[in-house]
Each structure stands twice: as structure tokens, then as C-alpha cells.
């Protein structure tokens, strides 16, 4: 198999929809950033790999990856997928495979994908997944086995097919793609798709490959839980993996699949079920953690944490509880999930005996005073005390 000359991973944007969690590409599972998993797989298929990212993440990504991975900052004046691609036009030439850095799927499909490109000498090719229910994405309009158009977010009764386009897009000439994107004019966030449609009108050799395996994406913070479950279920044997120097107290029960990172301490009488616990954490005595993601340097003290996501450097006071189920049984907010607890941003502090209602998001570096009941989202850098929200102060 002849490798593709260039692979471009789109990891731009400021992860606004992922709030209060930090950058999606460097979000870690089992001690490794998701982008590193992606690069390890893609290195088998590409000669050169470049990552375009938000400028605030460039230094972090540069320190994570090898010298042969090119890290490019997205021009802040250029937005969306189109902006990310246009930011790389002076760095890439020739054929290119464009991949979304926050999607996770079985990249073995690239074996057949590349074979099809070489055999049919295609100028453009993408990957499509069949859906039975409406999905707010780009749909393929097909005629005689060729793509006629990408229809972005049609009305549910106007979808041209059951095939949605995943972001695994091959172009034989990157310069032609750049020129197409720059030519199209649109008032919507679909400049990339419109540029692709421009190329489809002139391309004589295009195609798509159907994909029927797993597909996870990190767009919203609650999607961390489904991707966490995917990684945990890949654990071998008893489905429990402990890092180095993990200390476990007496009468502790750990139910797999569960991961506990290096140097974490699990106190006496703790129950951990189907969860991810990062490095240097303290899961204090009498705590219960169920189906939850906990990042690094998190401290719990006699808490219940169910179906929740807690980012790094968070302290949760004794007796604080994260509720995860509505009494009326209705789905929780926009997630559509029946069970969803709290989502806590990096560096926050939750006071003793605080209750956080299902699906509530707490911003980064936010302090919640003792005994509070938090029923709605709290922004970054706030201090909640006696029911009032103030600017964060040093405590």
C-alpha cells in the first residue's frame, strides 16, 4: 500500500461547545490524549502528518508529539473547518487526507479507502455512514455511485439519502481544495462543504466508502462518558487497570471496567464502578464513583459521583453529591441522556454538603460555597455563596 503524502488533522477551534472542559484533542483516556491515539494510527497511512490547532493549544501539542508532526496555529481571523484548512495552505502541497481530530473510529477502513483511491485514480473521496435516525450533519446526494452534492443539515423530511459524511476526506490536489474554498461565498458555517461541492461539480473521478463500525465524537462534554466506556471496555482480563504506585485502602470494591491512574489513593470503604480515575487523585473514604470520568489531581471526600465528568485539579468537599437522575424520568437537558450528573471544569472547588442537580455544568476556577444547591450552570471564575453568584475571589 502506497502511503498518502499528507494527512491533515483538524484540531482547531476553541472547544466552546465542549465547555467547561478544556481542549478536546488533548483530553486523555487511560493516560493518553485522544489526539495521540489518532496520530499513532494515522502514521501507518501517511508520509507527513500535520495538526492545525487553536493558538492557545500549540505549545502543549508541540511538547506532546514527535518532531516529525507539524503543529500549525489556526489563523484567528479564519473560523470553522474552512478556516482551519486555509490556515495550512502555505505548509501543505500535493495529495492530502483530512481527518477530524475529535472523531474516533476504526481507522482500519483506510486500508480499503486508499486501495480504492489508487485503483480508480480518484480525485476526491470521502467516508459515509448509514444512519436510520436523523442526524444534524452533511448528507450525501448520490447518483450512479458518484457523489453529486453534500447537503449540510437538511430538514429531517428533506434528507437526500441515509448516508452522512464523516470527516475522512481525500483530495488529490490540496491547492485545488484551497482555491475552491476561497471562491465560494456563504453566510452560513458551511464554507468547507460548499468548497467541496464546488469541486464535485468539476470532478470526473470521485467516490465514497461506506463505514459500518463504531464512531464516537467529542463535541459536547457529556460525550466524554460514551467514549470513556469505549476505552474501558478495551481493557484486558478482569477489566481493571491500575497505574503505578496506586494505593488502595481496606474494604474497597472496584467493579470493572475501571481505570485508575498513577499515584492515586483509594480510601477505605470506597466503591468504584465502571469509571475512569486519573493520576494523582484522592478518592476519599466512603465515596462512591459510578460510571464517571475523573481527570488528574482530583480530590473527593465522602461523596457520591454518578455519571459525571470532573476535569483536573478539582476539590470536592465532604458530603457533596452530584445527582444524576430526574424524578420525572425525562432526558437531561440537550444531552438526551436518562442519567447525567455534574460536569466540573478545571480548577474548581465544591463546598461541603453541596448538591448539584442533574446535567449542571460548573465552569473553570469556580468556587461553590458550602451547603449550596446548584440548579443551573455556573460560568468560569465565579464564587457562589448563599445563593448569590459573584466574581471569583481568592480564598
Image (cartoon, grey):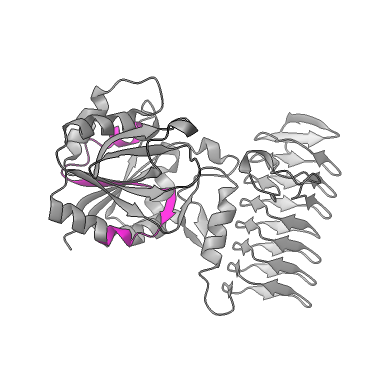
Residue drawn at x 23%, y 35% as measured from the top left = 89
Q: Is residue 30 visible?
A: no
Residue 114 drawn above or below residue 255: above
Residue 104 is one of the magenta-drawn residues: yes
Q: Quadrant of the C terminus?
A: top right
**Horizontal placement of 328 versus 54: left or right?**
right
Give the image location of residue 19, x and y in percent.
Answer: 58, 39
Q: Quadrant of the N terminus?
A: bottom left
Residue drawn at x 46%, y 56% as measured from the top left = 33
Residue drawn at x 16%, y 60% as measured from the top left = 2
- Which is more toward the observer, 279 or 25? 25
Give the image location of residue 34, x and y in percent.
Answer: 45, 55
Find the magenta span and give its range: 82-111
- Which is more toward the observer, 11 or 359? 359
- Which is more toward the observer, 30 or 57? 30
Residue drawn at x 73%, y 56% as measured from the top left = 305
Amino acid at each position: 500500500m502506497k502511503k498518502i503524502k499528507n494527512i491533515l488533522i483538524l484540531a482547531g477551534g476553541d472547544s466552546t461547545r465542549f465547555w467547561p472542559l478544556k481542549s478536546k484533542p488533548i483530553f486523555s483516556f487511560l493516560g493518553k490524549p485522544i489526539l495521540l491515539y489518532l496520530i499513532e494510527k494515522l502514521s501507518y497511512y501517511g508520509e507527513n502528518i500535520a495538526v492545525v490547532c487553536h493558538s492557545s493549544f500549540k505549545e502543549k501539542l508541540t511538547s506532546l508529539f514527535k518532531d516529525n508532526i507539524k503543529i500549525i496555529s489556526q489563523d484567528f481571523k479564519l473560523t470553522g473547518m474552512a478556516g482551519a484548512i486555509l490556515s495550512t495552505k502555505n505548509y501543505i502541497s500535493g495529495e492530502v487526507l483530512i481527518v477530524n481530530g475529535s472523531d474516533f473510529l476504526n481507522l482500519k477502513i483506510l486500508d480499503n479507502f486508499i486501495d480504492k483511491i489508487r485503483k480508480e485514480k480518484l480525485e476526491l473521496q470521502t467516508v459515509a455512514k448509514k444512519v436510520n435516525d436523523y442526524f444534524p450533519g452533511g448528507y450525501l446526494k448520490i447518483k450512479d455511485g458518484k457523489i453529486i452534492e453534500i447537503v449540510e443539515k437538511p430538514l429531517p423530511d428533506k434528507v437526500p439519502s441515509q448516508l452522512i459524511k464523516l470527516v475522512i476526506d481525500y483530495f488529490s490536489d490540496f491547492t485545488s481544495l484551497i482555491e475552491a474554498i476561497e471562491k465560494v461565498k456563504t453566510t452560513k458555517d458551511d464554507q468547507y462543504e460548499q468548497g467541496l461541492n464546488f469541486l464535485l461539480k468539476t470532478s470526473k473521478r470521485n467516490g465514497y466508502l461506506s463505514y459500518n463500525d463504531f464512531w464516537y465524537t467529542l463535541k459536547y462534554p457529556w460525550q466524554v462518558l460514551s467514549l470513556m466506556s469505549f476505552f474501558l471496555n478495551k481493557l484486558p482480563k478482569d477489566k481493571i487497570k491500575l497505574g503505578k504506585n496506586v494505593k488502595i485502602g481496606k474494604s474497597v470494591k472496584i467493579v470493572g471496567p475501571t481505570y485508575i491512574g498513577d499515584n492515586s489513593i483509594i480510601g477505605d470503604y470506597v466503591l468504584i464502578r465502571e469509571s475512569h480515575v486519573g493520576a494523582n487523585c484522592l478518592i476519599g473514604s466512603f465515596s462512591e464513583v459510578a460510571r464517571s470520568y475523573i481527570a488528574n489531581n482530583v480530590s473527593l471526600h465522602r461523596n457520591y459521583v454518578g455519571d459525571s465528568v470532573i476535569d483536573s485539579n478539582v476539590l470536592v468537599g465532604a458530603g457533596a453529591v452530584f445527582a444524576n437522575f430526574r424524578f420525572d424520568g425525562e432526558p437531561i437537558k440537550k444531552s438526551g441522556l436518562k442519567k447525567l450528573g455534574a460536569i466540573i471544569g478545571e480548577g474548581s472547588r465544591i463546598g461541603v454538603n453541596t448538591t448539584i442537580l442533574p446535567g449542571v455544568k460548573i465552569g473553570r476556577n469556580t468556587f461553590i460555597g458550602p451547603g449550596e444547591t446548584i440548579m443551573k450552570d455556573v460560568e468560569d471564575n465565579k464564587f457562589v455563596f448563599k445563593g448569590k453568584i459573584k466574581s471569583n475571589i481568592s480564598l
